[in-house]
Amino acid sequence: MKLTLHIWRQSKRSTKSDFKQDGKMVRYELDHVSPDMSFLEMLDVLNEQLTKKGEEPVVFDHDCREGICGACSLMIDGEAHGPQSGTTTCQLHMRSFRDGAEIWIEPWRASAFPVIKDLMVDRSAFDRVVQAGAFISVNTGAPQDANAIPVPKADADKAFDAATCIGCGACVAACKNASAMLFVGAKISHFMHLPQGQVEREQRARNLVKVMDAEGFGNCTNQYECEAACPKDIPVRVIAEMNREFVKAKLKEEPPSTKRVGGDG
């Protein structure tokens, strides 16, 4: 295969106020690409050629290359992770493109994900959301047998569907508002359907939404681009569950004016 690649090159880290800072699209010609190569392997071939020429290789993020970690976050021809649904960039193969195709490759475009260099972005905003409460911190005791705490199958299925989220950020990149509500909804839904997640349920909903807003993610306008772009097919029902959880948690929250500050006197 012969390909023409248009790749975003950016040497300096961008800021949240200007996430397209100091960058441009650069054109590359690439020959002898095997249809059986993954998209990242194709970029490896390009980088080998650039290195031999003494040019700066293209920076992109990757780790497992097995569709597990979510690091391979690229916008390909305007679609998060490329044209194949339910697929991460590392699992996308070049047979999905025609011979002689022109391919446009960019990083995620969101102010909450500033570009570090070229195609690599800083997704630590997701880490801070998780640190706000997307876990179980109560003492659950020693490990128990799988059948010791009965969980209805319907609840287990919903929890598992949400737990498959790999935090790649495709939902944010695909959304015109750069909303992270599918990601946050998945973290909340994962625990709300399990007995172990009930103790911190209300606190979790309040904290995760608070940090999500503070990181600068946008709001949802129910156009479902996030669900379409998600490589793990997280359903948009998790957003509705998040909204309900947050509203119930805020209604049960003690108003600031009634909180006691001093002693009994």
Image (tube, grey):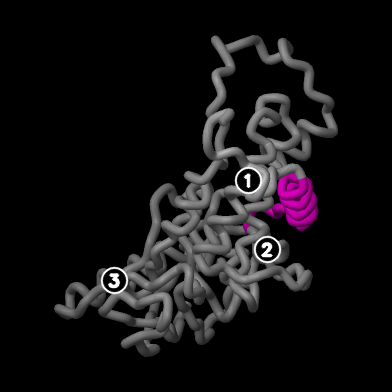
In space, the residues marked 3 and 1 are separated at their CA atoms by: 36 Å
List the single residue furthest toward the left: 54
The answer to whether residue 61 is magenta is: no
Q: Secondary structure at mark 2?
A: loop
* Crowd class of label 3 (few under 14; some 14 to 19; many from 20; radius 10 Å): some
Q: Helix, strand or loop at disc 3?
A: helix
Please, what is the three-letter code of the amino acid marked with disc 1? Answer: Lys
Q: Mark 3 — residue?
A: 47
Where residue 97 appears, as percent x and y from the top left, is 58, 75
At horizontal 43% and vertical 47% (from top left) the residue drawn is 64
Task: Pinpoint residue 31: horizontal percent, then vertical percent.
Answer: 38, 80
Label 1 neighbour load within 10 Å: few <14, some 14-19, many 20+:
many
- Picture residue at 78% right of the left edge, 69% below the top: 222
Q: Earlier in the sequence, mark 2 or mark 1?
A: 2
| In the image, residue 232 lies in the stretch drawn in magenta | yes
Residue at the limit of the structure toward the front, as seen here: 265
Task: Specify few, some or many for label 2: CA neighbours under 10 Å numbering under 14, 14-19, or 20 or more.
Answer: some
Identify the magenta region.
231-251
Asked if labels 3 and 2 touch by Cβ distance under 8 angstroms, the answer is no
Instruction: Note whether 67 is above or below 102 in the view shown.
Output: above
Q: What residue type is disc 2 on?
A: Ser
Quadrant containing the C terminus is top right
Q: Reply above or below: 214 against 186.
A: below
Residue at (55%, 36%) from the top-left corner? 135
Disc nearer the start of the sequence (3/1):
3
